[in-house]
Image (cartoon, coloured by chain):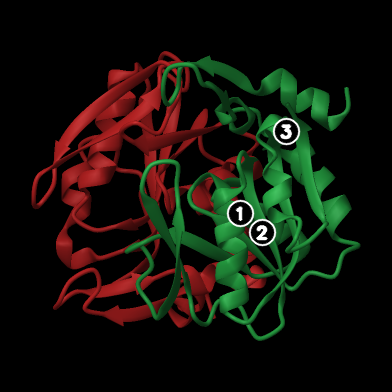
Chain colours: A green, B red
C-alpha cells in the first residue's frame, strides 16, 4: 500500500461529530500505530528535505502532533500557533471569522524571523479558514509562506482555493 | 551541560502569566531548537526503553509535543487525553476540580486495553491535578499506571504528593 492507502485504512469515520450530518475523520488510530506514524514521517521528510524551508509552524492542537516531529526530522525550529491566551510571551495575533462567530490565533513575536520561509502544518484541510489565518499571522510577523502541509484534505470543501494565493506548494497525504 | 542544565538554559521565565504574581515556565524555546529537542528525546528514550510500558498517553495540548515523539522512539502507541468535546469516537471521561471551577478530560474507550501499562506524559508538573485526573481516567478504562513523565516540575507545589499513590516512577527533567 502507498502512504495514502495506509492512512485511509487507519483513519476512522465518525458519524455526526461534532454535529449531526458531519462525518468526522478521526486520525487518532494513526497515533496508535507507531509503524504507520514513522512511515508518515519518513514520507514527509523525503518530500520536504529537498525544499527551502526555515521553520515549521503547527496549528493547535492536532497540528502539534506531526508538525513537531517533522520539524525535528528536518532539523528545523518548530513554532506553535495557538488559540488566544495560551502563549505566555510577547505575541502577535490575528482574528478571523468562523461559520458561527470568530476566533483569534496567536504566535510569539520572536518565533518567525524576517523573511524566514515557513511551512504551515495542520492535520486536516477543510474550508481552509485556519490555514489562511495562520498564513496571515505569519506574514504579519514578517515571514514568508514556503507551503502548506496536511495529513488529510476534504477536497469538496475547496480549502485549497482559499490558501493558494499564499503558496501553490500545498501537499496533503490523504484526499477525500 | 547535562540535560537539566540545557533545558534550564532554554526555558524562559515569563512574569505575571497567566495572572499577576505567577512566573510561567515557557517551554517554546525548546521547540525552536531542533538539537535540544533531539537531545531531550534521546535522554527520554534511554530511560524508558528499559521499562515495561505498553502505551504512552499525552495530556492536551503541550503533552502532545514530546509525548508522541517519545512514543514513536519507543515503538509504542500514543494515546490522546483531551479536553471535553474534542475526541470524536466512543469516550470515557473524568471530572476534576480546579482552583476555580472544574474540568473534564476524555479518552477514547479503545485507546487503552485491559491491564495495559501506561506512561503518562505532560510538559509540566504543577499541583498534579491534571496528572492525577489522567491517572484516574486510565484506571477507569482498565489500564495501569507505569509512571509519570514531565519535562519540568515546580517542586514547591508538591505535585508528586498527589500522584505518587498511582506510581512511584515519577521522572522530570528540570526541577524548580
Tell me which label, 1 or 2, sits earlier in the chain.
2
Residue A61 in view (yes/no): yes
Foreground label between 1 and 2? 1
Which element is circle 1 on? Answer: helix
Asked if badge 3 and badge 2 are on a common chain, one would say yes
Q: Secondary structure at mark 3?
A: helix
Query: Residue at left 62%, top 42%?
Result: A123
Q: How many other residues sit within 10 Å of disc 3, few (<14), some (14-19) or many (≥20)?
A: some
Determine the CA span between mark 1 and mark 2.
Answer: 7 Å
Q: Which chain does the residue under circle 1 lie in? A: A
Circle 2: is it few (<14), some (14-19), or many (20+) Cα within 10 Å? many
Circle nearer the N terminus (3, 2): 2
Residue A80: mark: none
Q: Residue at x 71, y 83 (%)?
A: A115
In the foreground, B24 or A54:
A54
What separation in Å lies between label 3 and label 1 (alpha carbons)? 14 Å
B143 left or right of B29 in image: left
- The reply to whether discs 3 and 1 touch (Cβ–Cβ < 8 Å) is no
Query: Does the rendering let one see residue B53?
Result: no
Residue identifier under label 1: A131
Q: Which percent across, then down, holds residue B50?
A: 56, 41
In the rendered view of the protein, which quadrant contains the N terminus of chain A? top right
Viewer-side residue, B68 vs B175: B68
What residue is shown with label 2? A120
Q: Secondary structure at mark 2?
A: strand
Looking at the picture, how far across and down is residue B49, in whole percent?
A: 59, 42
The image quadrant of residue A38 is top right
Left or right: B168, with A150 as reference point: left
Q: Where does label 3 land, which residue? A: A155
Amino acid at each position: 500500500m502507498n502512504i495514502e492507502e495506509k492512512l485511509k485504512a487507519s483513519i476512522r469515520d465518525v458519524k455526526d461529530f461534532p454535529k449531526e450530518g458531519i462525518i468526522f475523520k478521526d486520525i487518532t488510530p494513526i497515533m496508535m500505530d507507531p509503524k504507520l506514524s514513522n512511515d508518515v514521517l519518513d514520507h514527509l521528510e523525503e518530500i520536504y528535505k529537498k525544499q527551502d524551508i526555515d521553520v515549521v509552524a503547527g496549528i493547535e492542537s492536532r497540528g502539534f502532533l506531526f508538525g513537531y516531529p517533522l520539524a525535528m526530522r528536518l532539523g528545523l525550529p518548530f513554532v506553535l500557533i495557538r488559540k488566544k491566551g495560551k502563549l505566555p510571551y510577547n505575541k502577535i495575533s490575528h482574528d478571523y471569522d468562523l461559520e458561527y462567530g470568530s476566533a483569534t490565533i496567536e504566535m510569539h513575536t520572536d518565533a518567525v524571523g524576517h523573511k524566514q520561509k515557513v511551512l504551515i502544518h495542520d492535520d486536516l484541510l477543510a474550508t481552509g479558514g485556519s490555514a489562511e489565518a495562520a498564513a496571515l499571522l505569519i506574514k504579519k510577523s514578517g515571514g514568508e509562506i514556503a507551503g502548506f502541509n496536511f495529513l488529510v484534505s476534504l477536497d469538496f470543501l475547496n480549502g485549497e482555493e482559499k490558501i493558494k494565493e499564499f503558496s501553490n506548494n500545498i501537499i496533503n497525504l490523504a484526499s477525500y
